[in-house]
Image (cartoon, helix red, strand yellow):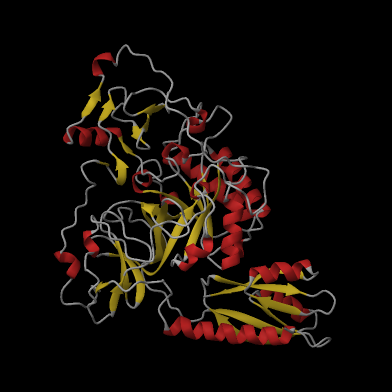
């Protein structure tokens, strides 16, 4: 296709995209299970449901799918933090087996003085929201278990190393940069046997028990998204004609919502085509953890596949920083990884997230002071921003945000929060857009095993009308046109003799489909394409790859 024909086609496509953006609800791959919308409705059907805010009697507090132990060792202090089904961290940073009280020394779980461990190793790759040990003890006792096991021997019995067999875990590689990396230690790439295209039929999810009966309302019908609801009753629906996510009491969390997963090497070789077909609308990809540890073993492949299939993606880095200097080191290391992966700021459909949690690392003490964390976050932000990455945010969980991260500075940057409860307890979101990681045990076609599920969207609806101009300039010497969103580039070309022909069209802000631009150095032509594979192939043929020209819906 000639440059002019391709540009015309892109212009028509963009115009069609804008019309569809105004006239249609966002694509959410919704299934046809429906319930009443609450807005302007005379009755609220969700109010008739009995929803418990508590986990089951045999589940960890705040973690409905994590088994409650039968006993907790007397060697686990009340002020320790339970960080997995099997482990608790004491105030001085020791990782202990929760039932035996033995100190864990396995480097794969606690690292060494000079080596940070994979933070997901303690939970076999699943997310877990840390809780206070005294809460776990109280629940164990209420459930008939022993909340003070071995108390008679606790004063004299020495700590011993954790004798449980070491499990195979994925290792990060700082050298490999090929997208088709094998992952022999993470789950296989076979598709999940669970059909995530159907509404989840979890017995505990009483908030959506409607037996598929559609009910018309003044706002239209509510539909359940391809992603499941959570175990507490937080659920998908619709609001003002857009996909939406609600808490168990049917309070709106976000409208204009997208179902998003977050992934790491623990999800193995993901079948991203199946993931996209199932209705997933975005992915947050772990690129690594700490500093100088290289890529998450599947990061490059996950980034490449999301690009190839047009799945909007963001990035996250798990932090092991304990002061401003190590925060800066993590920022520099992350910039290096992003550049090696070829990820520019314009490639990102979601932010770059700084994952701040209570970590365990042999010989090092986790910060517990918001002032220390302020220095860490500011240093990290500084390194990313100086490299041109400005869409940044903090990720954490509610209890940590209310304690060690209880800083106005950090809260002003927090846009993604984990809470596996009936409602979102964190209320200090600084922006209209926000994300709720609402379960760690999701099932999505294309992923073998479980995956974190998230609802991202806006608290208050934003206009879907076009808002960002695409300028057109004309070269009188060779008759070529160029389209650009960069007003500086437009003005600079005009100073060089190009004709500024004004705004050609508008594209929606916050678009998720990349339109790539290529330049032919032999004849001065530009072409535009939404196909990343074509962008790569034409670049190999000698055209200059000029990155993302703009994004569309």
Expressed as whole percent of the image width and height from the top left, the position of residue 362 reads: 50, 28
Is 436 positioned to the left or the right of 365 in the image? left
Instruction: Name the residue: 38% across, 73% down.
Output: 461
Quadrant of the rendered image containing residue 531: bottom right
Toward the top, the furthest residue is 156
Q: Nearer the viewer, residue 65 or 174?
A: 65
Q: Nearer the viewer, residue 451 or 336?
A: 451
Numbered circles on residues, count: 0
Q: From what the image shows, is residue 146 above or below residue 221?
A: above
Task: Judge whether residue 432 can be spotted in this image.
Answer: no
Q: From what the image shows, is residue 530 above or below residue 435?
A: below
Is 337 positioned to the left or the right of 368 in the image? right
Is 508 positioned to the left or the right of 151 in the image? right
Expressed as whole percent of the image width and height from the top left, the position of residue 190 reads: 49, 54
Task: Judge whether residue 451 can be spotted in this image.
Answer: yes
Instruction: Name the residue: 46% across, 66% down.
Output: 281
């Amino acid at each position: 296709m000639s440059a002019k024909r391709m540009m015309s086609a892109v212009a028509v496509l963009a115009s069609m995209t804008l019309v569809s953006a105004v006239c249609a609800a966002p694509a959410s791959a919704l299934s046809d299970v429906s319930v009443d919308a609450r807005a302007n409705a005379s009755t609220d059907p969700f109010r008739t449901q009995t929803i418990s805010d508590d986990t089951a009697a045999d589940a960890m507090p705040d973690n409905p799918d994590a088994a409650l132990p039968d006993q907790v060792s007397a060697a686990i202090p009340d002020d320790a933090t339970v960080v997995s089904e099997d482990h608790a961290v004491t105030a001085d940073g020791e990782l202990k087996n929760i039932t035996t009280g033995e100190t864990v020394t396995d480097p794969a779980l606690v690292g060494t003085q000079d080596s940070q461990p994979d933070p997901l190793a303690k939970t076999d790759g699943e997310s877990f929201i840390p809780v206070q040990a005294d809460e776990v003890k109280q629940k164990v006792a209420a459930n008939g278990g022993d909340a003070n096991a071995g108390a008679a021997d606790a004063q004299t019995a020495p700590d011993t190393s954790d004798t449980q067999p070491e499990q195979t875990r994925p290792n990060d590689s700082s050298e490999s940069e090929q997208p088709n990396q094998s992952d022999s230690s993470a789950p296989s790439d076979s598709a999940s046997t669970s059909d995530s295209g159907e509404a989840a039929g979890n017995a505990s999810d009483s908030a959506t028990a409607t037996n598929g009966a559609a009910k018309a309302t003044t706002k239209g019908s509510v539909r359940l998204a391809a992603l499941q609801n959570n175990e507490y009753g937080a659920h998908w629906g619709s609001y003002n004609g857009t996909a939406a996510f609600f808490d168990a009491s049917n309070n709106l969390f976000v409208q204009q919502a997208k179902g998003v997963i977050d992934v790491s090497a623990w999800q193995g070789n993901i079948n991203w085509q199946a993931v996209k077909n199932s209705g997933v609308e975005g992915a947050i990809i772990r690129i690594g953890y700490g500093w100088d540890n290289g890529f998450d073993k599947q990061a490059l492949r996950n980034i490449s596949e999301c690009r190839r299939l047009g799945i909007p993606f963001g990035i996250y880095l798990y932090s092991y920083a304990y002061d401003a200097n190590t925060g800066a080191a993590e920022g520099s290391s992350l910039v290096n990884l992003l550049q090696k992966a070829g990820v520019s700021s314009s490639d990102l459909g979601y932010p770059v997230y700084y994952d701040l949690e209570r970590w365990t690392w042999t010989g090092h003490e986790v910060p517990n002071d918001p002032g220390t964390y302020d220095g860490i976050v500011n240093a990290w932000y500084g390194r990313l921003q100086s490299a041109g990455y400005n869409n940044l945010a903090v990720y954490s969980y509610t209890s940590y945000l209310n304690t060690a991260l209880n800083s106005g500075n950090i809260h002003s940057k927090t846009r993604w929060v984990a809470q596996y409860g009936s409602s979102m307890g964190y209320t200090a979101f600084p922006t209209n857009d926000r994300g709720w990681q609402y379960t760690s045990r999701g099932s999505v076609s294309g992923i073998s095993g479980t995956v974190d599920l998230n609802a991202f969207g806006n608290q208050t609806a934003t206009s879907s009308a076009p808002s960002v101009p695409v300028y057109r300039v004309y070269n009188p010497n060779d008759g070529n046109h160029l389209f650009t969103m960069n007003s500086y580039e437009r003005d600079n070309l005009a100073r060089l003799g190009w004709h500024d022909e004004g705004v050609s069209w508008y594209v929606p802000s916050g678009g998720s489909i990349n339109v790539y631009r290529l330049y032919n150095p032999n004849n001065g032509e530009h072409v535009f394409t939404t196909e990343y594979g074509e962008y790569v192939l034409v670049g190999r043929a000698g055209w200059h790859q000029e990155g993302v020209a703009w994004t569309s819906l």
